[in-house]
Image (cartoon, rainbow, N blue to C red):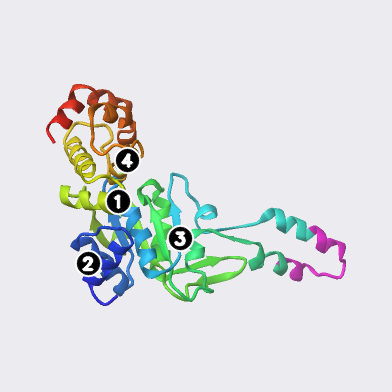
Amino acid sequence: MNSVSELQQQLAASHYVADRAVAVSAYLALKLQRPLFLEGEAGVGKTSLAQALAGVLGTDLIRLQCYEGLDVNHAVYEWDYARQILELRLLQVNDSVDRAAARKQIYSDQFLLKRPLLQAIDPQRTTAPVLLIDEIDRADEEFEGYLLELLSEFLISIPELGTVRARVKPVVILTSNRTREVHDALKRRCLYQWIDYPSFEKELAIVRERVPQAAARLAEQVTSIVQKLRGHELYKVPGVSETLDWAAALTTLDRTTVDAASAEDTLGVLLKAKEDLDSVRGAVLAQLIANI
């Protein structure tokens, strides 16, 4: 694409409603070949942007879901030990095979299990994939240190094979829900974009785009109720993904408007904590519906 506006239109064609700031950041990340660090509350569309970009570019989306204790074996590569042992036993039958040849054979590409990071920089790739490093704030700080090196050179050292370097740089998207602060050194490697909860107009546009079967009045009511709920004291504030789920659930129940009974029945689609359900059900929910 040749402009920010063109990218914005292509994202819309992939069912992602991007405001100007997000589109500019994504455009610059593509043109400058820099990782894009997306930060914001859960459910505001960070992961969806990576998925939409992969659709726009017509390339693979490779996702690394981060979690506490994530290590190299699960993020980068590991050896298929079971197959290596079997191969060794077969080689032992042949007394003429020397140790060096056996080692070279079992530590070859056919026994290497490529995890997301290695898949993304595989030199056999001729087109750049989108590498999504999702919820980096859930990983340990040691893993952040590993990413610093990877994002600088886009190479991985495998002691038994040597250095693997990307032929084409992947488009890298990192996301964080800010459960902890990510180190500044990692952020400096990236372009940064904060994604906030959308305005009423933008969220309504997202609902209409992603749940087109929803009645117009229902889409407006759902969006309005969620927008107002975000101003309440909640344990877990609903994100855009919950808005979409709620609109889809009510539509599945053949509702064209939100009424108290259907809202009560489906509130668990929108709110994901017992404390929030208890605080909203009844008078609060009825008042929200009455005021839209």
Which SS does the magenta portion mostly show? Answer: helix
Q: In the rendering, at what x and y percent does residue 265 appear?
A: 32, 28
Badge 4 vs badge 3, beta-carbon distance below 8 Å: no
Is 275 situated above or below 8? above
Q: What stretch is highlighted in magenta?
A: 89-103
Q: Quadrant of residue 19?
A: bottom left
Find residue 267 and report its horizontal and vertical position in percent.
30, 31
How far separated are the C-alphas under marks 3 and 1? 28 Å
Q: Earlier in the sequence, mark 2 or mark 4?
A: 2
Query: Which residue is at a point 70% across and 53% down the rendered structure image?
Result: 82
Q: Between marks 3 and 2, how big is the CA–CA gap? A: 23 Å
Report the residue marked by disc 4. Answer: 251
Q: Which mark is residue 46?
A: none
Q: Which residue is pictured at 30% across the width and 36% down the height?
A: 270
In whole angstroms, how far apart are the C-alphas of marks 1 and 2?
27 Å
What is the C-alpha distance between the residues marked 4 and 3?
A: 32 Å
Please identify the quadrant where the C terminus is shown.
Answer: top left
